[in-house]
Amino acid sequence: MNATHPWTAGQIAEAVRGRLCCGDPALPFAGVAIDSRTVEPGRFFVALVGEVHDGHRFVAEVAEKGIRGFVVSEDRLSDLPLSSLRETGAACVAVPNTTRALGDLAAYHRGRSAASVVAITGSNGKTSTRRMTAAVVATRFETLSTRGNYNNEIGLPLTLLSLRPEHRWAVLELGMNHFGEIRRLGTICMPDVGVITNIGPAHLEGVGSIEGVAEAKAELLETVRTGGTVVLNADDSRVMALADRSDHATLTFGLDESAAVRAAEVDVLPAEIGFELIIGGKRQRVRLRTGAPFMVSNALAAAAVGRVLGIGLSDIARGLSRYHAVDNRMRRLALAGDIVVLDDTYNANPASMAAAVQTLVEATGPGRKMAVFGDMLELGDSAERLHEELGVLAAQSGLDRLYATGDHAVAVAEGAARAGLAAGSIHTGTKEEIVRDLLRQVRDGDRILVKGSRGMKMETVVAAVCDRLQESNASAPGNGDDMDTKR
């Protein structure tokens, strides 16, 4: 956090509704930190408790670095060196839950900032939509955007705590894997504009069904500020069903002619998409540096936010043209022999798998089409069925060869075989086995998609293939794209 937004120990205690166990309430601090390894002097250290790490174990170590402020759990006070902290004049604030306290600090800081907030959620496309939206907003305003995949109850507060006085807008990404999470994140960031990109079968393990996903995403609508705007996908019937549940002004985007912000004359090339952006009867040609067709929808969502903020069509188009992909999100890698690898290994769910297969088939140019799939995680009791349906989709899309690895690889293979893909074109096994077979089978001109959930670490397949095939021309920033689920 910038030093121009200082804190005092008393403010921190007030923000988290905690008890100041020791220290002067007027003691000043430059900001908040959670990592004992990188905490800088002048920061207040919040001792978070995670599945593996516990910040309370490092309080003494952090104090030795000269840190003089701490937020800790009430039930861990007896484990801490309070007497030595008092001797150094440190301030210590006790709370029931330090993770919640981090969110409360962010909400307090957001409330004292002059910035407004765009909050984006959805089953797919959050990250690319957020990045595009930030690029559009930044054409007119000083803009803060979510860092990396900071979209949960720790990451989102850390982003908000980076708000500086010069920021006029913050563009934030909200992820979830259980009920109540979006509501909590929305309560922290208090959005002026809320965006729902789509609703699909993701994180079913936490919410039970696609209807549960819709209910979880709808929580965002409850948190949009009075006088704010909701931006909804006109092409997604489940999203549009939520429109009547909001009292806010609504702006729609999509390919459907009913959408207030829509696209026409879409041209898809291997590394570029062009389309006519239509808003209020006016048109503007837009160029996206990606060959993934589904990205048009994400661009329209970003354009709709630009419309809400009063940004003109030419500036919206300029912002969208600046978008470039991040690693492992539909990144196009050009190898020797005109072989192309689509690296979309950041994450996966059924909808993003379908979009990736569509991109492989329709937007990579001529050549045999192959896919390497890792498991889609967090699908609960629907996992076997959804993996079998993925196999069916792969076969029906006309893939020439299919590889699958993970606990549900057999289900993928069975679905593909049932839908008509020849048994000799289907291979299951470990990642190492798949790489060996793929390298034996590959020939000049092949197009290969690699995709799976984050926990499957499918990027190792990409690295092995590229290393052996001697990558000749990795894509420059912008020759790829991303689609996203909660991380």
Image: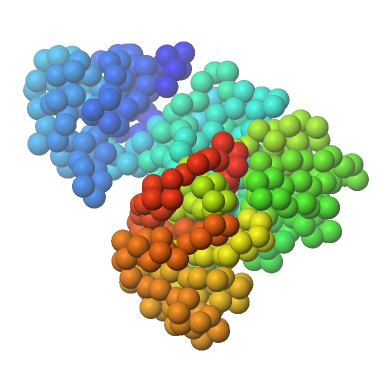
Residue 276 spot, x, y in % from top left? 82, 46
In the picture, the quarter occupied by the N terminus is top left
Q: Nearer the viewer, residue 358 or 19?
A: 358
* Above-or-below relation of 67 to 178: above
Rendered residue at 45%/53% (across/down)? 345
Residue at the (80%, 32%) spot, across then down: 314
* Occupied quadrant, residue 234: bottom right
Residue visible at 89% across and 42% down in the picture: 282
Outermost residue on the bottom side: it is 418
Q: Is residue 310 left or right of residue 203?
A: right
Identify which residue, 96 or 325, lies in the foreground.
325
Figure check: 119 above or below 413: above
Taking the spot 21% from the left edge, 42% from the top edge, the residue there is: 53
Q: Is residue 157 above or below residue 247?
A: above
Question: Is residue 483 something one can see in this rendering?
Answer: no
Q: Position of residue 420 (x, y in %)?
A: 55, 84
Q: Quadrant of residue 203?
A: bottom left
Image coordinates for residue 466, horizontal then vertical, percent: 43, 49
Looking at the image, what colour scheme do you see?
A: rainbow
Relative to residue 428, is residue 270 drawn left or right? right
- How far from the left and from the top, in percent, is residue 293? 68, 55
Q: Is residue 320 visible?
A: yes
